[in-house]
Structures are given as structure tokens and as C-alpha cells.
């Protein structure tokens, strides 16, 4: 049912018929030369929308009415007014009311790529595939290198099984300068449909390299590996799959998302400000979004967490923690909730940074409870547990993190060091050996393996010659304290105590010159061993920082968070 028009819209009354024609802003209201074929446009029932959105849509409707009635309005201006009206209605999900606006805008400005683009997306959203295809084809007639239109059109043809039409569209998109996961995923789907499994794997693995969080890619990748007969890899990717849309680089769609004066729109604008490192502006936008959003709504929690992030980045740690705590307080009693998980993760990082280990563990645990696939929170929990001495529990969390992200270097390293901490040196050696093969550029694995081979208390694990070879390999990239310490361990294991002691004296002297007193003290323990012609039998001392992963304790941050308000 059309909404009555207010008196401020300058609408001509047709008294004899008892009608108000402003609800049909087309042929009935305007017979200006050359424009009699315009489609009527009407306001839908806006009662379900927030008051600011209702006002925004009505204001644009009034503006459009004025431009229609003014005989001198240029076609380009009128086209933009119709199109803006359609964008507002579409953003508010009034698709039926938006369609004639876009069609009128397109008729008045056939060279403007915006209107067929929005029509293509509108028809796609309502399930009218034929019209959507024709609309995106029109976009490409006007702008042949439109990345979004190429991808949307390619997907539409893929959905209809028309791989021979879809493929050249994705190929054209891939030739454009902006790399896009959606393009590689599309080419992978084409190859998969043709049973070209190796080609599909190549495209889909490249897509994951571009965006490791593109979790929906894991399903077609699993099918491709299954087609190649690699069942282990297929099952591993199926475990990592989740039904999350692969975003299409589409500036016009983003503009639509930002259009309404709503909590969601302000959240999107705030995210843009965060990306631009405009912390104060982001905080202001998130606050405005909160004023338009019910306090118990999921969007409210999302806005609060992002507000806390903006405040922390702007230097207001106390304000940030207050927002994170309020987000956690507003959490649903059970179930999944991404914003609650993120707020607890942020609280975990903050409490770990001020030395509150038990609190950090509790917050990280809450984060993975509300979002079990939250890899960063799993890693944070594992590190916090290991730092607290609960090493066996930490190993379980590192394992879960690696199930979610098998190439996560920090989790792999933490797992190996946790094995060392509880004396499982053989497992640590084997794990580090595999890690070197899987991550050849990560020198930390090579250094850790060298230390285990040089100083493990397990004689069946020690191999001084191999340890020295690994250290020599690393020395080609330069020296540092830890590498010098490891070289001394390997030399001592090979019985060259004089060289080990001489090497470590130089390292201790370097640490002292740099003011690293704790490091110099730890290094001196092994120096005394070598001077007494004894080998080292501890790859790392128990108080070595390597056994305390996670953020270092920040005393200034602790003071800021724990001092009385206003102090």
C-alpha cells in the first residue's frame, strides 16, 4: 500500500478525482516532452524501518518529486535523482519499489554504468536470473573492464552450468590489475566442473594464498583433491570449510551499503575510517551507530567492540576495555556470537598484556566458546595456557588451531616448544623437522631444531654434527645472540669446549653492551658449563622468554588500566 504524501512535496492535486498523484510519480504526474514513458514510482510502507531511515527516504522522495515537476530539470540530474531513490529503497530491501526508479534512471542516462549495475544486483537478489544477466551484460557494453560485473555475470552462468560462457568472463577479470579471490575461485569452479582437477587445485590454492580466510573455497578444493585421489587433503579441507560468501570487489555495492542513516551504515563507515587510520572519526561513527541501534541487538555488540578497538588505537585503553567488557556483558547466554568472541579476545590480549594470566585464559576460553573456529583466539588461549605452566592443555589448543589453519606458523612453533617444555624431545625433533620442510623460509624452526639436537637430555635425540650444520646454514644470514648461544651448544656437544666457551663469552659481552642483563645472566649459566668442560643439557632454560609466549607485560598499560578514573 502506497504511503500518503505530506504537504511539503509540492504535489498537484486532482480534486475532481479525489486523488493525490505523488504516489505515482510517472506518467500521471508529468507529461513533459520526451518523458511521458517514465514508469510510476511509489513509496512503500516504511513502518518497519528506523525513524532516521524513514526520514531519509521521504526526503529523497520529496526531492525527486520537485525535480519531476520542474520542467527545466536536466535529464542527467533527474536520472541521478531517480537512481538515488532506487538506491535508498534497495538498501532498505524494498526491491519492487526500487526497480522502476533504476529503469527510469537508466532510460534518462543510458551511458551511466550505475543503473544497470544496480538492476543486475537487484534482479539477482530477487531470483530473476534472466533479467540479472541482461543487466550485467549491459554494464559490460558500457564498461567492458568492470570487474564486479564480470564476476557477477560469471557466477550467474556458473550457477546455470554454462561453464563455456562463464570461463571467458573470469579470464577477462583475471587480466585486470586488481587480484581478486572471487575471480580465482570462479576459475577453480569452472575447472572443477570440467573435471580438470589439477587446474582446479591450482586456482583454488592460489585463492587461499590471496585470502587464507576465504573458508568457502575449501569445499570445491576438497572436491578437486578427491578427484585427484588425494583423500587426506580432501578431508583436511572439508574440515576447514564454512559457508561464508567470497566478497566481490564492488565499489557500487559498497556505496549502497553505506547509504542509509542506520546503525549498520555507520558501522560500515566506521570500518572505512579504521582502515584509513582515522581513529577518532571511526569512534565517532561507531557511537552514532549505537544511538540508532537497540542495546540488545547483535549489531549493538558489533558496534561496541569496534568502538573499543578505535578507542584503543587512539590511545584510550581504559575506554576500550570498558567497551569490550560491556560487549561481553551483553552477550547471549549461549550459542555463537562473533562480536562477543572478538570482545573476549580483545580482553584476553589486554589482560595478558598487564600480567593477569588467569583473566586472560578465561577471556580466551570465552572467545572460543562463542566462536569455536576463531583461530587467533585458539592461539591466544594456547599461549596463555603455556605461559601459565599448563603445557599439556596448551598442546591441545595448538592442535585445534592447526586443525583450523594447518599452516599457522605460530601454532606449529608453540606446539613444538610445548613438547620441549614437558620433555617430549623426540616428538619435538620430528615436529620441527616437518615444520622446516613445510616452512622453509621460517628460520625459527631451523634454530629450534639445532638447539634440540645440540642440547636435548635424550641421547637418542642429540646429533651435534647435524646441529652445527644447521647453525652454519643460519650464520649465512647474519649473527644474533640466540644464534651465537646455539652455536656454542653445538660446539660443546661435539666436545670443543674451548671454542664453545670463547663463542659464548663474545655473546655475553654483546648482551651486556646492549644492556640486556637478564639475557647475559642466562647465557652465563651455560658459559660456566663449557668452562668446566661440560655440555649443555637444556635447549632453553626454564625462565627463557621463549616459554612465555604472547604479548609482553606492559607496565604503562597496567598503570593506565588499573589506576583510579581521572588519576
Image: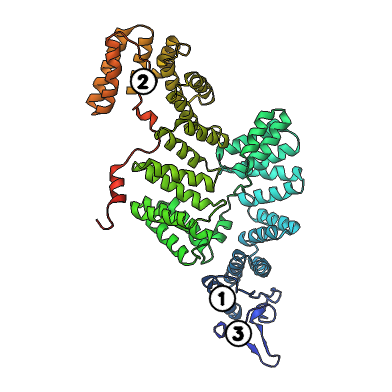
Q: Residue at x 52, y 44 (%)?
A: 368
Residue at the farthest top position: 495
Closer to the camera in the image, 47 or 42: 47
Dot 2 or dot 3, earlier in sequence: 3
Q: Residue at x 30, y 17 (%)?
A: 526
Q: Would residue 275 be found to the left or right of residue 34 on screen? A: left
- The numbered mark at residue 483 is 2
Asked whether the residues under the numbered discs 2 and 3 touch, taking CB atoms below 8 Å apart as contact, a structural biologist would say: no
Dot 1 or dot 2, earlier in sequence: 1
Q: Which type of secondary structure does the marked residue at label 1 adopt?
A: helix
What separation in Å lies between label 1 and label 2 (alpha carbons)?
69 Å
Instruction: Say above or below: 481 vs 147.
Output: above
Q: Nearer the viewer, mark 3 or mark 1?
A: 1
What separation in Å lies between label 2 and label 3 (alpha carbons)?
82 Å
Asked whether the residues under the numbered discs 1 and 2 touch, taking CB atoms below 8 Å apart as contact, a structural biologist would say: no
Q: Residues within 10 Å of mark 3 (few under 14, many from 20)?
A: some
Residue 147 position within the rendered picture, expressed as x and y whole percent measured from the top left: 61, 49
Can residue 278 be seen from the camera position used here? no
Q: Nearer the viewer, mark 1 or mark 2?
A: 2
Asked whether the residues under the numbered discs 3 and 1 touch, taking CB atoms below 8 Å apart as contact, a structural biologist would say: no
Which residue is disc 1 drawn over? 58
Which residue is disc 3 drawn over? 11
Residue 135 position within the rendered picture, expressed as x and y whole percent measured from the top left: 70, 58
Can residue 16 be seen from the camera position used here? yes
Residue 463 quadrant: top left
Residue 274 position within the rendered picture, expressed as x and y whole percent measured from the top left: 43, 52
Q: Would residue 89 be found to the left or right of residue 414 on screen? A: right
Residue 254 position within the rendered picture, expressed as x and y whole percent measured from the top left: 55, 56
Q: Residues within 10 Å of mark 1 (few under 14, many from 20)?
A: some
Number of disc labels: 3
Q: Nearer the viewer, mark 2 or mark 3?
A: 2
Amino acid at each position: 500500500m502506497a504511503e500518503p504524501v505530506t504537504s511539503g512535496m509540492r504535489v498537484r492535486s486532482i480534486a475532481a478525482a479525489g486523488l493525490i498523484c505523488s504516489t505515482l510519480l510517472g506518467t500521471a504526474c508529468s507529461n513533459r516532452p520526451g518523458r511521458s514513458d517514465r514508469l510510476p514510482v511509489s513509496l512503500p510502507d516504511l513502518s518497519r524501518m528506523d525513524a532516521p531511515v524513514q526520514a531519509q527516504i521521504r526526503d529523497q522522495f520529496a526531492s525527486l518529486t520537485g525535480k519531476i515537476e520542474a520542467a527545466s530539470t536536466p535529464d542527467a540530474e533527474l536520472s541521478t535523482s531517480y537512481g538515488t531513490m532506487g538506491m535508498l529503497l534497495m538498501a532498505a530491501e524494498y526491491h519492487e519499489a526500487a526497480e522502476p526508479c533504476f529503469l527510469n534512471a537508466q532510460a534518462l542516462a543510458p551511458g551511466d554504468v550505475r543503473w544497470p549495475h544496480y538492476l543486475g544486483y537487484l534482479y539477482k537478489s530477487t531470483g530473476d536470473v534472466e533479467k540479472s544477466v541482461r543487466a550485467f551484460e549491459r554494464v559490460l557494453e558500457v564498461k567492458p573492464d568492470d570487474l564486479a560485473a564480470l564476476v557477477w555475470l560469471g557466477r550467474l552462468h556458473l550457477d546455470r552450468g554454462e561453464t563455456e560462457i562463464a570461463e571467458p568472463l573470469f579470464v577477462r577479470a583475471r587480466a585486470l590489475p586488481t587480484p581478486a579471490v572471487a575471480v580465482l575461485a570462479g576459475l577453480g569452479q569452472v575447472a572443477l566442473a570440467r573435471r580438470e582437477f589439477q587446474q582446479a587445485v591450482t586456482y583454488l590454492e592460489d585463492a587461499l594464498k590471496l585470502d587464507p580466510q576465504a573458508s568457502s573455497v575449501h569445499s570445491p578444493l576438497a572436491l578437486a583433491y578427491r578427484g585427484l585421489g588425494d583423500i587426506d587433503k580432501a578431508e583436511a579441507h572439508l574440515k576447514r570449510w564454512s559457508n561464508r560468501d567470497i566478497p566481490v570487489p564492488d565499489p557500487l555495492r559498497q556505496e549502497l551499503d553505506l547509504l542509509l542513516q542506520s546503525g549498520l551504515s555507520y558501522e560500515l563507515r566506521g570500518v572505512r575510517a579504521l582502515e584509513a587510520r582515522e581513529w577518532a572519526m571511526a569512534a565517532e561513527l561507531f557511537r552514532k551507530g549505537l544511538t540508532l541501534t537497540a542495546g540488545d541487538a547483535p549489531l549493538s555488540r558489533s558496534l561496541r567492540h569496534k568502538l573499543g578497538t578505535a578507542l584503543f588505537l587512539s590511545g584510550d585503553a581504559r575506554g576500550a576495555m570498558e567497551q569490550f567488557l560491556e560487549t561481553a556483558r551483553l552477550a547471549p547466554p549461549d550459542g555463537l556470537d562473533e562480536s562477543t568472541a572478538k570482545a573476549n579476545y580483545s580482553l584476553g590480549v589486554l589482560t595478558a598484556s598487564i600480567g593477569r594470566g588467569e583473566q586472560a585464559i578465561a577471556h580466551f576460553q570465552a572467545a572460543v566458546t562463542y566462536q569455536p573456529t576463531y583461530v587467533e583466539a585458539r592461539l591466544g588461549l594456547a599461549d596463555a595456557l603455556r605461559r601459565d605452566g599448563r603445557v599439556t592443555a596448551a598442546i591441545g589448543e595448538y592442535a585445534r588451531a592447526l586443525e583450523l589453519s594447518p599452516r599457522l606458523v605460530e601454532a606449529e612453533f608453540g606446539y613444538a616448544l610445548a613438547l620441549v617444555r614437558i620433555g617430549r624431545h623426540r616428538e619435538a625433533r620430528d615436529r620441527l623437522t616437518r615444520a622446516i620442510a613445510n616452512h622453509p623460509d621460517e628460520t625459527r624452526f631451523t634454530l629450534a631444531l639445532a638447539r634440540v639436537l645440540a642440547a636435548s637430555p635424550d641421547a637418542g635425540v642429540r646429533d651435534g654434527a647435524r646441529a652445527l650444520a644447521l647453525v652454519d646454514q643460519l650464520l649465512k644470514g647474519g649473527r644474533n645472540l640466540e644464534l651465537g648461544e646455539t652455536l656454542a651448544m653445538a660446539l660443546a656437544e661435539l666436545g670443543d669446549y674451548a671454542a664453545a666457551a670463547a663463542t659464548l663469552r663474545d655473546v655475553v659481552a654483546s648482551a651486556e653492551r646492549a644492556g640486556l642483563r637478564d639475557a647475559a645472566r642466562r647465557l652465563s649459566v651455560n658459559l660456566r658449563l663449557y668452562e668446566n668442560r661440560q655440555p649443555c643439557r637444556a635447549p632453553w632454560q626454564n625462565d627463557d622468554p621463549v616459554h612465555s609466549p604472547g604479548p609482553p607485560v606492559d607496565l604503562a598499560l597496567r598503570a593506565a588500566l588499573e589506576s583510579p578514573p581521572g588519576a
